[in-house]
Image (tube, rainbow, N blue to C red):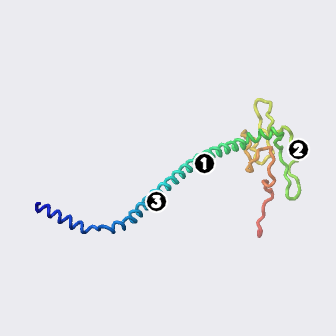
């Protein structure tokens, strides 16, 4: 043998002395098992967490679809309510029920006197009668918002939102007495 082979033997012998032999290998087994169990537990936990997130994602997607459907339904119902609340639709349904617009309203003043002429509503009020002549003549209306007699424009609605010839709520009527300030 050459000297290189002897040196190799010497080096291998020294490395062999550094490595533990015999009973020390048994002490590594629990450590290796602990590391394997921790890695396996971590992987299983990660898998369960990923599955839970996917299930939540599917549920979130279903809830978004349901929210969109319910929003569309709510908007359709709101459009239906708006269509039925339109003045023309309300008037048509009132006529189907046999209701007629009221004539000029009569008001009860705070002193007990009646302003206007009370009476039952007629089937066709004067404000809705179409004249037979080809050129309509402006008819003065008894409401406070009637245009001047020389004006040919149609009457404007009153601030309370009532039309000429319809009954106004009594609380909407203002007093014609001038207000007095105390101390003057």
Q: Which residue is mark 1?
A: 67
- At a point 62% along the width and 46% down the height, the residue shown is 71
Pair 1/3: label in front = 3
Pair 2/3: label in front = 3
What kind of element bears circle 1? helix
- At a point 81% along the width and 58% down the height, the residue shown is 177
- Quadrant of the rendered image containing residue 73: top right
Q: CA distance from mark 1 to mark 3?
A: 38 Å
List x then y, in percent, for residue 10: 17, 66
Quadrant showing the C terminus: bottom right
List x then y, in percent, for residue 6: 14, 63
- Quadrant of the rendered image containing residue 13: bottom left
For marks 2 and 3 on the same chain, the one whose residue lies earlier in the sequence? 3
Instruction: Work out whether 10 lies above or below 130.
Output: below
List x then y, in percent, for residue 145: 75, 47
User: Viewer-proximal residue, 83 or 134?
Assistant: 83
Residue 55 badge: none
Pair 2/1: label in front = 1
Q: Which residue is mark 3?
A: 41
What kind of element bears circle 3? helix
Q: Which residue is mark 2?
A: 120
For marks 1 and 3 on the same chain, the one whose residue lies earlier in the sequence? 3
List x then y, in percent, for residue 63: 59, 49
For marks 2 and 1 on the same chain, the one whose residue lies earlier in the sequence? 1
Q: CA distance from mark 2 to mark 3?
A: 88 Å
Badge 1 crowding class, 10 Å Cα cut-off, few under 14, some 14 to 19, many 20 or more, is few
Q: Residue furthest bottom?
A: 183
What kind of element bears circle 2? loop
């Amino acid at each position: 043998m050459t000297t290189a082979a002897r040196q190799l033997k010497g080096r291998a012998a020294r490395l062999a002395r550094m490595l533990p032999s015999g009973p020390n290998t048994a002490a590594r087994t629990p450590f290796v098992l602990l590391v394997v169990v921790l890695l396996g537990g971590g992987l299983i936990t990660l898998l369960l967490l990923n599955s839970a997130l996917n299930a939540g994602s599917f549920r979130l997607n279903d809830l978004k679809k349901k929210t969109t459907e319910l929003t569309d339904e709510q908007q359709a119902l709101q459009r239906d309510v708006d269509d039925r609340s339109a003045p023309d639709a309300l008037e048509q349904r009132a006529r189907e029920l046999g209701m007629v617009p009221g004539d000029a309203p009569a008001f009860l003043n705070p002193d007990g006197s009646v302003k206007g002429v009370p009476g039952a509503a007629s089937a066709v009020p004067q404000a809705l009668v179409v004249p037979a002549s080809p050129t309509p003549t402006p008819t003065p209306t008894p409401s406070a918002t009637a245009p001047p007699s020389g004006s040919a424009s149609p009457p404007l609605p009153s601030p309370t939102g009532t039309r000429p010839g319809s009954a106004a709520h009594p609380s909407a009527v203002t007093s014609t007495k001038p207000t007095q300030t105390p101390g003057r």
